[in-house]
Image (cartoon, rainbow, N blue to C red):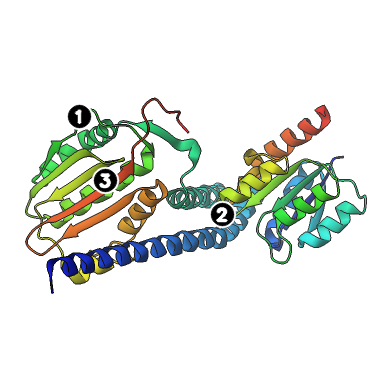
Amino acid sequence: MPKIMVVDDEQEIVNIIDVFLRKKGFEVFKNLEGDKALNILKSGDKMDLLIIDMRMPKMTGMDVLRGLNDAGIKLPVIILSGSIGLQKDIDELLGLGYNEKDVMYKPIDLFEILAKVKEKLGENEDK
Amino acid sequence: MGLFDFISINRDIARRKKRENSQRFAQFGKFVEVMAHDVNNPLMVISGRAQLSLMEKIDNEELKKNLQAIFQESQRAKDIIQRILGFVRPSKDRTVRADINKSLEGLISLIEPQFSMDNVKIMKNYGVGLPEVNIDEKHMQDVFINLLNNSRDAMFKGGQIKVSTCRSGENVKITFEDTGPGMSAEVMARLFEPFFTTKEKRVGLGLSVSYSIVKAHGGELDLKSSPGKGTAASITLPAMPEGGSNA
């Protein structure tokens, strides 16, 4: 069963994605804080996919992606955003090896998330 | 005061106005981004909860319809917010090299019958051989329609709007001049303020959004008006070099 970590400081959003993806057969690990999520990922707890909000207090989604990159950890990522990305953020994402298409803008149709999750996991399996 | 002092003061005022408008544009962009973030999170909760409920077995058709409406309307609200965000940050993907005369004509041909019914005649004076401009055509047409509607609304007894295009140095200039009643200096001073309006039942975002769109294209939007002398709105957009790529 694929393991997905969902990180967003909005508890309700994490809960909704958690319930939905579990219904669809995924194992979901919830987290409300970027720094805790990064520590778990760096500790060797292997996830198949990370779904992370861009704008969070303390440690942002971008900070987490930077931390993963610095630690040499590569995993498929879906980035959630409540707003449109600043060009500098998009440029940095590209620099970290991600794509503008990895960003999904809230409110997101849960079935669009599912399609993206399947696409990402498929990509990962190919690699 | 000599003539040169007078010209110098006018230049200072124009520079200050431009600076103030740029600051308002930046503030408006920031406001829209924060608003989008703060609204989209609860919208996601609303639409997500509706979708989760729809995944359950629901025998009550009315309840099912209500949930579907909640989901669809929250997606519609998202589209509106994304559109406003696009105004302040147009995507590079959507910009195309465009012939400004064709872009104007495409829009004017659609609205002319309605304007004619309101006794407003649109006169066209398009420049020949103008360079192309790099624009998000949909957004720029939103600016044109906003300016045209403002002129029409000001001329409730009818009148004329002259739409002209020309080359102005390294720019292409589009001007909308109406024969309306014009505006006082007090109204002119507040025109680009978000939520400022002189009309009933209007939000007052039309001109500030238009200003934001034009600035995001690297252009300028200026308005000149005085009571009894109509209003002239002009947009200048950077001209594309001939034969350049569609970046």
Q: Which residue is identified by label 2? A: A83
Q: Image point 66% across, 39% down: which residue?
A: A99
Residue B237 versus residue A54: which sits nearer the camera? B237
Nearest to the observer: residue B32 or residue B44: B32
Label 2, label 3: how many angstroms apart (C-alpha)? 26 Å
Q: List x then y, in percent, for residue B205.
A: 34, 59
Name the residue beneath numbered marker 1.
B128
Find the residue positioned furthest to the bottom: B1
Q: Percent x, y for residue B105?
A: 23, 33
Nearer the observer, B145 or A74: A74
Looking at the rendered image, the quarter that the C terminus of chain A falls into is top right
x and y percentages locating residue B246 in the rendered image: 45, 30
The span from disc 1 to disc 3 (Cα, nearest Å) is: 22 Å
Between disc 2 and disc 1, the foreground one is 1
Label 3 secondary element: helix
Q: Amino acid at mark 2?
A: Ser
User: Picture coordinates of residue A17 (x, y %)?
Assistant: 71, 51
Q: Chain of mark 3?
A: B
Instruction: Provide the residue designation for mark 3.
Output: B145
Which amino acid, mark 3? Ile
Q: CA distance from mark 2 to mark 1?
A: 41 Å
Mark 2 near mark 1, Cβ–Cβ under 8 Å?
no
Asked if residue B53 can be seen in this view, the reply is: no
Q: Which mark is residue A9?
A: none
Do the residues at pointers 2 and 1 share their chain?
no
